[in-house]
């Protein structure tokens, strides 16, 4: 029998609401020591996912680029400092940077199929939702790795 992911998922996933600010999200990242959280609505339905990578893209230095439009070329420069960009995030809504098309799994999906998704897509974690799209947990790569370790070296063999 293929082991369902609900047997190893973490039921208490770190989340934020869709109406929170990026300042609040960064605070959650720092306090919880996590690199990504699921964004939910008031009914705990998944509406997005925000990662530290999304934040990094927003504050990263942009390369100078040129735009050619027929007869003229326009150069765009990034004159804003890293610190100014970081401060500007504080009051912006989380959904401005969050991924809105979130790949989720169901509790009865096999651990192997979830491992395949995490590996191929290079995700660190994936939300687990019920049939109505309500968040019921999260599965991280580390959780599956611990499960593998338990299979290989656990007691009762």
Image: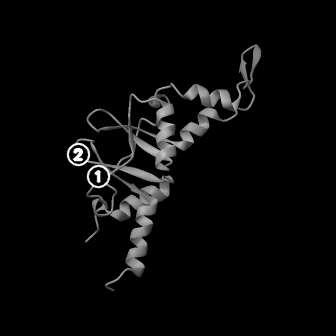
Mark 2, Cα crowd under 10 Å, few <14 / some 14-19 / many 20+, is few
Q: Residue at x 37, y 80 (%)?
A: 154
Q: Residue at x 39, y 28 (%)?
A: 19
Image position of 8 with respect to 48: above or below: below
Residue 46: give x, y in percent of width and height. Answer: 33, 39
Q: Residue at x 56, y 43 (%)?
A: 53
Viewport quadrant of the N terminus: bottom left
Secondary structure type for disc 2: loop
Residue 77: give x, y in percent of width and height. Answer: 74, 24
Residue 93: give x, y in percent of width and height. Answer: 46, 27
Rendered image: mark on residue 131: 2
Whether label 2 touches label 1, CB < 8 Å: yes
Q: Quadrant of residue 11?
A: bottom left
Q: Residue at x 70, y 34 (%)?
A: 61
Image position of 36 with respect to 100: above or below: below
Residue extending farthest to the front is 31
Q: Which residue is mark 1?
A: 106
Secondary structure type for disc 1: loop
């Amino acid at each position: 029998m293929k082991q369902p992911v609900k047997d190893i998922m973490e039921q208490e996933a770190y989340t934020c609401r869709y109406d929170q600010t990026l300042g609040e999200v960064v605070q959650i990242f720092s306090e919880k020591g996590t690199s990504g959280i699921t964004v939910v609505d008031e009914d705990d339905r998944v509406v997005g996912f925000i990662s530290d990578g999304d934040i990094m893209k927003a504050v990263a230095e942009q390369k100078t680029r040129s735009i050619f439009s027929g007869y003229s070329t326009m150069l765009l420069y990034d004159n804003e400092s890293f610190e100014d960009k970081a401060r500007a995030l504080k009051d912006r809504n989380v959904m401005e940077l969050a991924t809105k098309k979130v790949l989720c799994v169901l509790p009865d999906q096999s651990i192997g199929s979830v491992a395949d998704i995490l590996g191929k897509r290079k995700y660190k974690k994936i939300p687990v939702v019920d049939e109505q799209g309500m968040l019921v947990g999260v599965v991280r790569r580390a959780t599956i790795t611990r499960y593998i370790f338990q299979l290989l070296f656990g007691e009762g063999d």
